[in-house]
Amino acid sequence: MTALLDASPRRRTWDAFRRDPLGMGGAAVLLALAAVAALAPLIAPFPEGYGTDTLHPPSAAQWFGTDDVGQDVFAQVVWGTRVSVAVGLGAAALAVAIGALVGLCAAYVRRLDAPLGLAVDLCLSLPVLPLMILVAALAGPSVRTLAVVIAAFSWPEAARVVRARARSIVPLPFVSAARTVGGSPLWIVRRHLLPGVAPVVLTTAVLTTSRAVLAEAGLSFLGLGDPANWSWGTILHRAQQSGALASAWWTTLFPSVAILLLVLSTTLLAAAYTDARDHRDLP
Amino acid sequence: MRCGVLLAAGALVLMTACGAAPTTSGAPGVAKRGDRLTIGTTADVANLNPLVGNSRTDSWVTNLMYPHLMQMDAAGRRIPYLATDWAYAKDGRSATVRLRDDLTWSDGRPVTADDVVFSVNAVRKERFGVVAGLVTALDEARALSPTSLSFTFTRPDGTFLDNVGFWLPIVPKHVFEKAPSVQRFANDAAWVSAGPYRLTRVERGQRYVMERVESFGPGRPAVKEVVFRVYPDVNTQVLALRNGEIDLIANALPPATALALKGDPEISLVEVPSLGWAHLQYNTRREPLDDVRVRRALAHAVDYPAIREIALKGLASSARSSVLTPTQPDYADPGVHEYAHDPARARELLREAGVSGLSLDLIYDHADPKIARWAPMVRDSARKAGVTITLRGLERNTYMDRTHRRDFDVYAGSWAIMDNPPANLALAFRTGGFLNYAQVSDPALDRLIDQGGRALTREQARAPIRRAARIIHEQVYDNVLYVETLTVAHSARWTGFKPMPSELLSIVNPLSLAAVKPVS
Amino acid sequence: MRFIVVRLLRGLLTLWFAVTVTFFLVRLLPGDPVLAVADPGMTEELRAKLLADLGLDRPLGAQYADYLNRLLHGDLGVSFRQSVPVTTVLMERLPWTLLLAGSALLVTVGLGVPLGVLAATRARSLTDRVIQASGVTAQSLFVPSVGIFLLVVFGANLGWFPIGGAVDLDATGPAAWLSALHHLVLPCLTLALVQLGGYVLTMRATLVDALGADYVSLARAKGVRPRAVVWRHALRNALPPTAALAGLQLGTLVGGAVLTETIYAYPGVGRAVYEAVGRLDFPVLQGAFVLLAATVVVAGLLTDLACGLLDPRMRAS
């Protein structure tokens, strides 16, 4: 216990995190998925072309079975990991960057607080998925479009969280002190506000990733995905198109499980991290 | 806590808001099995005005309400419906049609020649829908008596009767003439119809309920009630069919589903020939596609049998690379043969044309399940011939827009119904034709197509049309990949369907639904 | 009173924002709305006439002003494709979306709050862990996957629930209500399942904090029974964040109905949006967004009002 108290906050968070099996499990799954995404070309060939063995259930040769044109579903899921992870991370990074910027501005610049807060609230009350459908149809299907569209409708959530957190830091004595001694706003934000909001930014980023993965899957499932690339939603969309969704369970189950794994592990990771921070001072 | 209760109460208020919906939707009495045929469709009716609506669901529903002059048999020949017989004058400048006298509108008035004249003129005057493009030769339509009428033409047009007879829905003049614009007339209530069934109830997003017309002239339908139910997705449709919630899936099944349902004793599959074809078109105004050798090379670079076997699961037949498909036995030309899949020959032709490193964009509607399957196969087999094809799967409206502007190298698509070769070739290959996506402009071809159009009988039209089709084949103005064998599924508890070609008619055409009955 | 006025104004502002955003977004869609209505073979003159008929020939600003003006009079315009008023098209569908979203909310709160309480009172026990884990897992599910699974198992294989639609054709009176409920079970369950986790976790987290707070210890010291402590004192403090969450998630809930409605062939507004995008039916699209946004605003207003009246502290925020 003494050792714990002596250690740095970061160290203590890590020690608390390490003892959470769910968080560690989530991190492990995420690392595995990241590895699959990065090493996809080594694991399976890019699914294209066709085979004569169509809609074959899982077997030793094709672990996840084949789809209606005889492509290997395993290869599709492996390559789908790339797009799903890329869209998830890309959208989250963009959304959190915008959200943090807006949130910090709102919290720090008093005059901007009311209008930005209102803007965030307005955006939060829009029916997001139908709007995404509209914009995705508008912008045409590509991986980049999907990431931008999802980010465009996810940043308000991040902004709300960052703003709330930053607003609790701005009135603190050290910030006022920095202001009085004439620190430049940029310096104050960087030196005091950013470190203060970093934990919530991190948590929000992770949660936004999981939401972005679900959104990507939803849009791709509705046929608004990138037809030249594989994502988990695209696999489900193709299964739906070919009428195999309900009959060939393997075309549905494996991409669904992949989505679940990624979303679940990110959520667990975020929860464990928050928990570890909150409880790092407890024995 | 109270806050939560209030929240829940709020939700309850929301729920009560819909109080009206379930209670108004009741029909008296529960229908006995065999009294009701429930049909699954994948979309809502977009427009109940038969002159405007053009989606498949629109046609399925309105075809049961509004008669046409003619129907089509399995070979694409016209057979009587409202019209009993028809003929051109010797010079081809006029035609007469006689009507049956036993069809009445649901408000009691008879269906007469005046209604036919009104329908033709409405379409011609406001120029909308499929039919407007098919009646350009019409000079005047005139009712001679309640059961006969005549058409006069500005030029001989042997495609007119077949086109108008099959495509034009006949609407009640005394109802539609009250609308300031027939095209903007919604026809969304108090329907006056004359088909075998009349629409009684519309629940958008859910179902369309139709009741049989007891006094329907050609014979009382056997089934009391036909219900169209909307399922946005074929997978749920199949589950519902297996569960007995629906008796028939109106849309043609995806090939994989058709195979999966084969052998299910509760379900009968009906094969319906397609009147259309799936094809690739090359933009003949773009270099180097303006060179016939390049187009031929591309034709040799497609693996036709693989597309039919894998993407279509064998549920397609060869069209012998001709626009006169086997579904048109009166026109089909046995002397034409399919382009062989021969990458070496393709390379050779490209070399002859002095083209190397050819790279093309291929546009298609990525929501079309079949094309989305074979477009990658076209790309892969072209690679073997040294041609790089980049797939551009587009959202439907963008695709239509690009097609309309002829903004593509290679176009992948399919025609649903090409039922009348002389008329269809004019639209698709004559200089300036509005379906002439490849931008063909070939004077010899134009002459032959015109000659076929003027011919008053199929026999006279056959020779010029075959010669036109040969030119299209040799010049690769169109690269026909296959003719689909459409498969529709219905519950084995029903029998007596009368299948007709094309998804539009299939087994949900009015004559078929008037004849169907439960298995006793 | 001032609180109510502020909330109302805010609601109106939100509506205006939704209308404006969608009005301009819709008009940026690629493709030609006239092409979706008429044949591509139309002449230029016919095209001009159609554009005029649909009101698309005027400058965007004028179209926008006109749209707002009509909207104030409750007129959502006339559908391009169906030639009937948008209100006719959508009002028939809105109740189903409300029913679906409302009942899903009810089920979510009804299950989420007790589960959260249970988890909090037994913090760090096995029960707590199981509840948390299930909540998080449910939250991570992909709606179409759950939908297909439930349909195949409970609809097709067991035959307990219908495959699609919202109510039986033959049912009348009370039977119609029962039938509607019967059709509602699977879609409602799906939608509730994916929302549940958030409520359980929020409820648990705030309750754990509240249970450690001074006034709870005081109550305990005064000898109030533990269960009574939880329900009377701690819960009151833990509910506002939950209500706030409900307010926040309304948008997701109503929007998320699109996927649910698609899978279950449920005749709601969400499905209409998806179809209207494909048909370039601008008025229907706009109308659907207006209705969805209005639903969110009204429901949010109700939660705000209810909770604000109960808990004076919330009025200040």
Image (spheres, coloured by chain):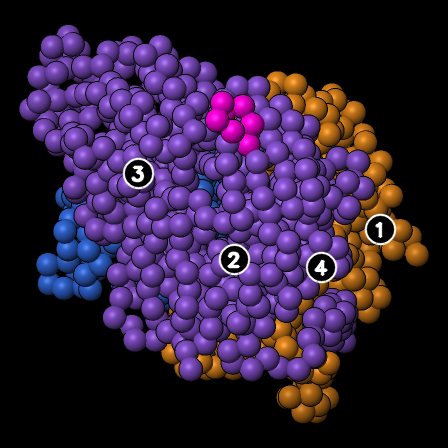
Chain colours: A blue, B purple, C orange
* Mark closer to the observer (2, 1): 2
User: Which quadrant of the figure contains the N terminus of chain C?
Assistant: bottom right
Q: Give the CA separation, mark 2 to mark 1.
A: 54 Å
Is residue B91 inside the magenta stretch?
A: yes
Question: Badge 1 is on which residue?
Answer: C8
Judging from the image, what secondary structure is the residue with disc 2 in? Answer: helix
Taking the spot 8% from the left edge, 17% from the top edge, the residue there is B348
Residue B34: percent from left, percent from top = 51, 78
Q: Give the CA separation, mark 1 to mark 4.
A: 51 Å
Q: Are marks 2 and 3 on the same chain?
A: yes
Sequence order check, earlier mark of 4 and 2: 4
Question: Badge 2 is on which residue?
Answer: B510
Sequence order check, earlier mark of 3 and 4: 4
Q: Give the CA separation, mark 3 to mark 1.
A: 71 Å
- Kindly identify which chain the residue marked by label 2 belongs to: B
Question: Badge 4 is on which residue?
Answer: B106
Q: Badges 3 and 1: C-beta atoms under 8 Å apart? A: no
Q: Are marks 1 and 4 on the same chain?
A: no
Question: Badge 3 is on which residue?
Answer: B330
Residue stretch rendered in magenta on the structure: B89-95
Judging from the image, what secondary structure is the residue with disc 1 in? Answer: helix
Q: Residue furthest top?
A: B354
Figure quadrant of residue B3: bottom right
Residue B363: percent from left, percent from top = 36, 29
